[in-house]
Structures are given as C-alpha cells and as structure tokens.
Image (cartoon, rainbow, N blue to C red):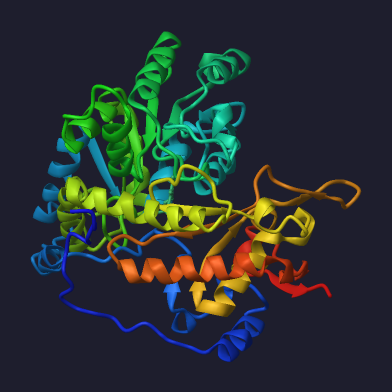
Amino acid sequence: MKTFIEPFKIKTIEEIPITTIEQRTQFLEDANNNPFSLRSEHITIDLLTDSGTTAMSAKQWAALMDGDESYAGSRSYYKFENIVRDITGFKHIIPTHQGRAAEKILFSVVGGKGLTIPNNTHFDTTRANIEYSLCDAVDCPVEVGTKPDVTAPFKGNIDLEKLEAVIKKAGPENIPLSMITVTNNSGGGQPVSMQNIRETKELLSKYNIPFFIDCCRFAENAYFIKMREPGYENKTIKEIAQEMFSYADGATMSAKKDGLSNTGGFLACNDDKLAEKAKTMLIITEGFVTYGGLARRDLEALARGFVEVLEESYLEYRIKQVENLGNQLIEAGVPILVPTGGHAVYLDAKRFAPHIAPEFFPGQAIANEIYRISGVRTVEIGSLMFGKKDENNNHVAPPMELVRLAIPRRVYTQSHIDYIAEAVIEVYNNREKLRKMKIVWEAEFLRHFTIKMEYID
Ligand SMILES: *Cc1c(COP(=O)(O)O)cnc(C)c1O
C-alpha cells in the first residue's frame, strides 16, 4: 500500500479552537506580536514544541490508575527503573521531574569553574545549567550540520577533530565529562550515527573522560540509524538503542520527548560515587530516590511509554509524518532545512524572506503571518531567540534564521499536516508582503518568552 496511515485509532478527542482571521489578527496584537504570549485557547494547531505535548495511549492512561503513590519503594518506580535499565544498561537510574532537573543535579555535582564540557550542540537548558555552575559549554558540530541547505544522513554528528582540539586545549583533567545529544535538537533534530558514537567513546577513553548521552530522542535517533546506517537494517530499535547506550557512562533525559509522556526525566550513570552525590542532590531539590519530583503514576505512564516508543510502526509513522510535511513544502519551493529531522520541520527564514535582514527578525514575521492566516503556532529560532548586541549596539545575528514547526507525538492527523503545509505555502507565496519588525520591550534573560514586538512600516 502506498498510503501510510497513523498506526492508531482515536478513543477520546479534544476539541481544537477554530477562529477567524479577524480574531487572530486581534489576538496577535494583544500578544504584542509574539506567538509565545498567545493563549492556547486561541490556537488551532500548536507546533510550539514537541516537549510534554504527547498524546498518551489508552494503556498509559490505564497505567496511571495503577500508580502506587507510596513515598518510598513504590512499585511504579521499580517498573520504570526496569525498563530504563533494560534499554540503557546503566546501573543507577535516578528519576527527575523533567530533563533540566537531571542536568541541574549532574552539573552541580561535576561542574565548576575552570572546567569544560563539550557536546555536538548543547541544548539551551543544558548550556544554561553548565554555565550556571561556572563551567564552559563548548559545541563541536560537524561542518555540514551548520548548513541548512546541504543534505547528509547524519548531520547531528560531533566533529571528532574539533573535540580532540578542545580536550587538548582545556586539558583532559579539566573535562569532567563529554556529551552527545541525540538527536541533535539545536542542530535541526538531526541524527547521530552509531559510528560517530563509537568513535567518540574511543577518543574519550584515550583521555579517560566519561561519556554522557543527552538522550531525549534516543528512539528517533535509533530509527534513523536503522534506516540510514549500513549493518543496522535488520536490528530492532531496542537493540540499536542498547548499543548506543553501551558506549556511554551515563545519560540525561527529558522523558517529555521519547518517554511519550507529559512530564518526567532521569539521570543515569554507572559510577557509584557520582550516583551517591546525585542522589543526595535529588533528595534536597526534587524528592526521594524512588520518585524524583514526579507523581508515582507518572512513572507508570513513562514505563509504558518506553515500551511504545520502541515500536517500529510508531517510529515509522512519526518520522514519515515529519518528512511528509517537509516534502509538501519542498515541492512548493519553500526553503527548509534538509533533510527533515526527527521531531520538527525548520523553515529557512533567510531564504524565505530575503528582503528582511536578520536585525529585523524575518523568522518572527513569518511565524506571525502563519498564525494570522491559519491559527497554526510555530516558533522563531534565530535573531529573536539568540541575537545579541555588540559594544556599538549593532545586531549580532546567530548563524541561522529558522522557524521551527515542532510536531507533538501522536496528536495530529494527516489532514492537520496538510492544513499546516497549505498555511506555510500560502505565506510563502505572499512572502513579499512580510514586514520588518522591531523590539519594543524585552526581558534581561530568555527574552523570546515575553518579548513585545511591533512592525516597521
Ligand atoms: C527538552 C530538552 C532538554 C531539557 O528537558 P526539559 O524536560 O525541557 O527540562 C534537554 N536536552 C534536550 C536535547 C532537549 O530537547
């Protein structure tokens, strides 16, 4: 059969708001032309993030009911621990309420002044937690990973030469651990190859540096390995994931992604001393070691989520849905980051709206117009999110100007995808009408959450 279908049927539904263009124009104005400030009740399709926005299965909802809310020694924790250990092989599995809590604990234990932590590309919360401990966070992406219009199978890889240069410059004794993020979220949701993970391990072993995986999207990464890396086509997703983790000494995870749940995370490692310190921090900041800031029923939902995320029919649907949206846009000539990654399609705002210079926020102008004409919310990842001012108050733009369309897991159907594509193509076909924007108010940190914008006429 040519038609690919959602490998599930719908048991319960949630209405989505249908609004008019006049209403949306007003909502956007009320939100100071910042989609982040919109109310969800005014959004028809929400592509702001794939984090914690998953639709849970009937079995997960049933598992919630079976949660054992004991403070200590809950059987729900042991179910969670069992499945996470089965996939990752790590000795210590420490639950947290989300990914950044695991990062906060890890870096308050191993971070500190004068130290360096490399990664393919640090996710923003990872970088923030490392820098908060006064440690340096260094990115080592492969060259091709920074070029939106160049296709390659594993654009998420870490550059081993750059990594070795960082190790030599900082001194291996000043690198408490080195990381790889799978898939590489900040680099466009691009996968990392098994070969790259293996070679990273070999390099780090040479210098005695522990290796950690930021594994938020480990199942999506494993699926890409199965599809693209020779030698893995006949392995199961679980076997591939197990091999990925076999090279690592530990991991952090936001289970709001490939845990197929609405909240949760973990820190895992093999080192007893590190685990002991982390567990002490956990008790101070999150909760006891058998729940880590979560309701125990959430651990039940996660334990089931980790089983479902390894199902190939789910992953095939997941990756093909994102790819299908990308292909519809490419066929209409819309410039996007290629190839499409695991969890999102990224519009290349520089080529989409070349008449708007980065300092006038082309990505934000595109995101606003998509919302205005369709009720689809997306997010700018460019000068608004990462732009800085130099000492002469000139705009310093990041390397890429993107608009991210993150796809929540199991939430939207193919007709929703068709609607999203139609909206983006419509904006693209009228792109010369997109207008420059300016900031009228901004917060000191993470300004994109609350920024106020106006159009320049
Ligand atoms: C989401 C994410 C995190 C942070 O997790 P939260 O659950 O949002 O705290 C860390 N790393 C990556 C790669 C992520 O995508």
How many tags in the picture? Answer: 0
Left/right placement of residue 228 relative to residue 432 reads left
Q: Nearer the viewer, residue 229 or 191?
A: 229
Q: Is residue 428 above or below residue 289?
A: below
Left/right placement of residue 246 relative to residue 363 reads left
Q: Nearer the viewer, residue 383 or 214?
A: 383
Q: Is residue 31 above or below residue 259?
A: below
Q: Nearer the viewer, residue 82 or 139?
A: 139
- Which residue: 16% across, 29% down? 234
Residue 306 on image: x %, y %? 20, 49
In the picture, residue 302 is in which quadrant?
bottom left
Residue 328 on image: x %, y %? 45, 58
Quarter in which the C terminus is drawn = bottom right
- Which residue: 73% across, 67% down? 432
In the picture, residue 403 is in which quadrant?
bottom right
In the picture, residue 305 is in which quadrant?
bottom left
Residue 144 on image: x %, y %? 56, 30
Q: Is residue 91 visible?
A: no
Residue 106 on image: x %, y %? 41, 38
